[in-house]
Amino acid sequence: MAKMRYFPFEVVIEKEEGSAGYYAYCPNLPGCFSNGKTIEETRRNIREALELHVESLSKRSAKIAPKERLVHVEEICIGIPA
């Protein structure tokens, strides 16, 4: 049985602007993103994208970014005079 290495990655899932779907990306892996019609589908799709991205990096002996904790994610709404 092959030995497994596990890599934790944080992902961000956002509502797609002008669409009924969602968009996901990994801040620590530039170029690794996916989307889906629901949050659950988007989560499955980004997991697959992460697996393929890390597999590709591993095959090229490229460095896999260490996990960096997101400190805070927040939406701030401000008002400005019209």
Image: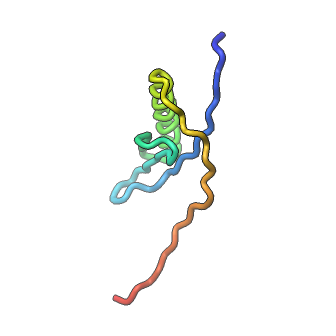
Depth check: 78 or 40 in front?
78
Residue 51 seen by the camera: yes
Residue 34 seen by the camera: no
Q: Residue at x 52, y 51 (%)?
A: 12
- Across and down, in percent, residue 32 comes to 44, 40
Q: Residue at x 52, y 32 (%)?
A: 63
- Across and down, in percent, residue 51 comes to 51, 30
Depth check: 49 or 53 in front?
53
Depth check: 41 or 61 in front?
61
- Across and down, in percent, residue 59 comes to 47, 21
Asked which quadrant contains residue 8, the reply is: top right
Asked which quadrant contains residue 36, the reply is: top left
In the image, residue 22 above or below residue 53: below
Q: Residue at x 44, y 43 (%)?
A: 30
Q: How many marks?
A: 0
Q: Residue at x 66, y 16 (%)?
A: 3
In the image, residue 59 above or below residue 51: above
| Quadrant, the C terminus | bottom left
Left or right of 22, for residue 9: right
Residue furthest toward the top? 1
| Quadrant, the N terminus | top right
> Which of the colour schemes (rainbow, by chain, secondary structure, one colour) is used?
rainbow
- Across and down, in percent, residue 22 comes to 43, 50
In the image, residue 47 above or below residue 71: above
Asked which quadrant contains residue 15, the reply is: bottom left
